[in-house]
Image (cartoon, helix red, strand yellow):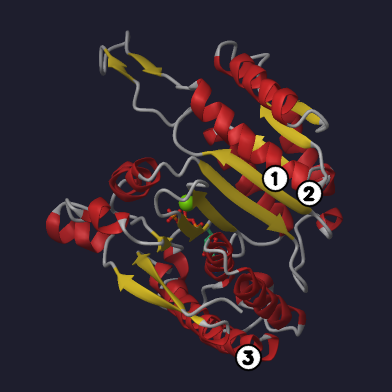
């Protein structure tokens, strides 16, 4: 039991099903907090696409400053079928990731009880993908020349720095060490001849110098994608660049069950700034407003948030609660059940009481 602390958390429900999963998550976190002797002071932020339509900006000009003194950020989803993704992504999520130096993106994948994975062999998989989160292939460097002519030419540059590559490698290597597993590094040094050999070299040096006993496997991204489908239990920790990590984590989530389950933590591991926790799924426009959204991705993200805050028992209790509800056979429609968001979330609240 920890002391009676209050954490300040900014909640950005966002668009689409975002509010439908954030609202029950807040209720579950409050319940688990009260049972573990701490509380959350939620600051609700109505940022997102509606705000963009009203004001021309996804968040206020002083939005980043407003988040800076908080202990963490819980995000539902942002995006709108009528607004392009570049506007929504670069208007909110990417500035938050970069301003608060959330240089690692952690995405755990396991097959939860009672969930039918897409690949039968995935039962028992326990994978954490550590994705570089502030540079790499997602870069503003580049441009278009001779627009619209037959000589049109587009250059999109990827930017890799020694500092960012080394520190994401360091985070992943120490996680692999703690798990007693090999570190798998995603590469493509046979085709991408500047950045990927550099990536390989920096990852190798970090492992050699700081974790000399750790086994490092550098695997080409194409082969690694196939391996995750064919042998999902053959990796425990994967470190990957921004783009490769993005693709692999959606792939892993699909292999393990449903996109509605997967969580994502955007971390500043040194805790100088707030970290951001979100479900991997998007706004799911096809099911908005019908009480069909699976809240597990958001609940699991909140559990990662509690973990990051140091509230380990509360994090485990929240994770245990939704796992127990699944194991007892209550599932939302995306997992083949018939429970609504409301029914599932109520069952999690009850299970928290039993857990604690
Ligand atoms: P966006 O553009 O915001 O990423 P999207 O439709 O491209 O939205 P997702 O929101 O990830 O992508 O949805 C992909 C599919 O998965 C949709 O059919 C959606 O209904 C389903 N889905 C996503 N999240 C959930 C969830 N939490 N519960 C149930 N189904 C979900
Ligand atoms: Mg999408």
Identify which residue, 50 or 212, lies in the foreground. Answer: 212
Question: Which label's residue is closer to the chain start, 1 or 3?
Answer: 1
- Which label is found at residue 213? none
Q: How many marks?
A: 3
- Residue bearing the label numbered 3: 353
Q: Mark 2 near ligand 1 (CB under 8 Å)? A: no
Residue at 37% across / 45% down in the picture?
A: 100
Residue at 48% across / 22% down in the picture?
A: 161
CB under 8 Å between discs 1 and 3: no
CB under 8 Å between discs 3 and 2: no
Residue at 73% across / 57% down in the picture?
A: 256
Residue 188: horizontal and vertical position, in percent? 65, 21
State the SS at label 2. Answer: helix
Residue at 58% across / 35% down in the picture?
A: 168
Local packing at callout 2 (Cα closer than 10 Å; few below 14, some 14-19, many 20+) is few
State the SS at label 1. Answer: helix
Question: Which label's residue is closer to the chain start, 3 or 2?
Answer: 2
CB under 8 Å between discs 2 and 1: yes
Residue 126: horizontal and vertical position, in percent? 77, 54
Residue 94: horizontal and vertical position, in percent? 37, 43
- Residue bearing the label numbered 2: 179
State the SS at label 3. Answer: helix
């Amino acid at each position: 039991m920890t002391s009676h602390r209050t954490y300040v958390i900014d909640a950005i429900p966002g668009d689409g099903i975002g509010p439908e999963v954030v609202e029950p998550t807040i209720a579950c976190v409050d319940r688990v907090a009260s049972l573990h002797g701490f509380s959350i002071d939620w600051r609700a932020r109505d940022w997102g696409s509606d705000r963009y339509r009203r004001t021309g900006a996804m968040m206020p000009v002083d939005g980043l400053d407003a988040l800076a003194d908080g202990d963490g950020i819980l995000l539902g989803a942002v995006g709108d079928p009528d607004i392009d993704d570049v506007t929504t992504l670069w208007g909110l999520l990417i500035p938050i990731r970069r301003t608060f130096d959330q240089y690692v993106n952690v995405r755990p994948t396991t097959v939860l009880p009672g969930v039918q994975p897409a690949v039968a062999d995935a039962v028992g998989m326990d994978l954490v993908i550590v994705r570089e989160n502030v540079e790499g292939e997602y870069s503003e460097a580049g441009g278009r020349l001779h627009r619209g002519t037959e000589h049109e030419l587009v250059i999109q540059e990827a930017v890799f720095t020694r500092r960012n590559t080394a520190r994401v490698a360091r985070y992943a290597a120490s996680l692999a060490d703690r798990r007693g597993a090999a570190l798998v590094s995603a590469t493509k040094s046979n085709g991408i001849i500047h950045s990927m050999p550099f990536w390989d070299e920096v990852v190798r040096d970090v492992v050699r110098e700081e974790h000399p006993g750790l086994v490092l496997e550098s695997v080409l991204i194409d082969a690694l994608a196939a391996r995750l489908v064919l042998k999902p239990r053959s990796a425990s920790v994967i470190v990957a660049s921004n783009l490769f990590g993005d693709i692999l984590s959606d792939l892993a989530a699909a292999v393990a069950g449903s996109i509605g389950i997967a969580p994502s933590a955007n971390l500043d591991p040194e805790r100088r700034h707030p970290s951001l926790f979100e479900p991997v799924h998007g706004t799911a426009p096809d099911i908005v407003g019908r009480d069909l959204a699976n809240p597990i991705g958001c609940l699991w993200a909140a559990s990662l948030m509690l973990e990051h805050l140091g509230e380990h028992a509360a994090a485990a209790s929240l994770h245990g609660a939704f796992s127990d509800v699944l194991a007892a056979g209550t599932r939302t429609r995306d997992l083949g059940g018939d429970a609504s968001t409301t029914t599932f979330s109520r069952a999690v609240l009850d299970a928290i009481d039993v857990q604690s």
